[in-house]
Image (spheres, rainbow, N blue to C red):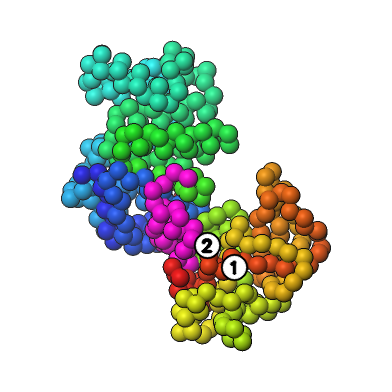
Amino acid sequence: MSAIHLQGLSKKFGDFTALKTMDLDIADGEFMALLGPSGCGKTTTMNMIAGMEEPTQGRILFGECDMAQVPMGRRGVGFVFQNYAIFTHMTVRQNLAYGPRMHGASRPEIDRRVGAIAELLQLTPLLDRKAERLSVNILQRVAIGRSAILEPAIFLLDEPLSNVDAAFRAVMRTELKHLQRQFRQTMVYVTHDQLEAMTMADRITVMDHGVLQQVGSPIEVYNNPANVFVARFIGSPGMNLLPGRPAESDRGMVIDLGPVGLTPLLPAKLAQRLRGHGGDVLFGFRPEQATIAHEGRGMKAPVTFVERIGARIIVHLGQSESAMKVVLDNDARVSLGASAIITPHMESARLFDRASGAAIGQGA
Ligand code: ATP
């Protein structure tokens, strides 16, 4: 019953299309992230699932049940929004108890549920505090508790962590995942933060400009992005994409990257698929899947900047279209301005059609 099926779903606001025909199946008990930049249609999609917006076209089914005539209050979904919606004049306990009380739960049942959810969300010591005296971080935790306590079969969260501080966000990522594992709800989680989606979701739906770009597990969208949008959006930094043309070397196929030089040999499977392609391509490799040397043959570019991010460094190389980044351990020896030889790990390198941006030979 708590699987969600979106069939040919679209939404227009006047002439503006916020969501273009979307087909998506979310399994019962699945943690699905809707991921994309601001304005890509995530919230609109979520609002239609919740029953807050009517689709312009298409159907929403919960299990076998068409939701077209089912009002928001009867869909059995729980929500958490970016701005915590809690009663500040009440205590944490009263806030948590509010939903079960409204649903007519008995006193012992309410106490049991409040105790359990407070324990899970580490709110037990704060149960008798007035909400108005709590930090934003804790308020959002209470808001999550207030929805979760009703054990909805479907739980919708819209950027719930965007207002909390970075350290707390990291803690909450783990807790939310834990919460979902415990209750096995179907969870739809809207975020523009790829790290949140990657760390929590079973699968990610990547969206851009109202169009679904790819659906897959975090590792699938990371390893095999369907197109250059996903390649850039997933990963931090995103995938390097260098313009080039296929070329035959004496030992096999390579990509000629112009000023950067030639790539190492393409793996046989990728080379085979590329033979049927012919045109201009983008050569993609992840910044963390390459090494740098100061001498030797191969792809060459000057080091333009070194960003230190604690345990790792992000080395910026080359310029304009041929700019790329390589992530290395912080003890790597890199000199600003020096010419570096970059060796991508070719088994995980990817190719994209330069005109359409679509992946070539995905899964190779
Ligand atoms: P954000 O994280 O910024 O909310 P989003 O991906 O959730 O981004 P939506 O809120 O779904 O994006 O909005 C998608 C597009 O639809 C945006 O361009 C937005 O301005 C537009 N939009 C949303 N609601 C309305 C509305 N009621 N009337 C007109 N346009 C709207």
Q: Is residue 214 magenta?
A: yes
Q: Which residues are magenta?
A: 199-227
C-alpha gap between disc 2 and disc 1: 8 Å
Tell me, yes or no, whether the two marked residues, 2 and 1, touch with CB atoms within 8 Å: yes
Spot occupied by residue 113 in the image (x, y as percentages of width and height): 31, 21
Image mark count: 2
The residue carrying mark 1 is: 241
**Residue at the image position 81 percent from the left and 58 percent from the top:** 335
Is 145 on the left or on the right of 238, as rendered?
left
Asked whether residue 251 is drawn in magenta, I would say no
Q: What's the amino acid at mark 1? A: Leu
Residue type, mark 2 in image: Ala
Residue 260 in the image: above or below residue 129:
below
Residue 271, percent from left and from top:
51, 79
| Residue 103 position in % (x across, y down) | 24, 24
Position of 230 compared to 1: left or right? right
When asked about the image quadrant of residue 280, the answer is bottom right
Give whichever of 17, 36 is nearer the camera: 36
For this rendering, which residue is in front, 1 or 17?
1
What is the crowding at mark 1: few (fewer than 14 residues within 10 Å), some, or many (at least 20)? many
Say if residue 344 shows up in the picture: yes
Q: Quadrant of the N terminus?
A: top left
Answer with mark 2 or mark 1, whichever residue precedes in sequence: 2
Q: Determine which residue is flagged by label 2.
A: 231
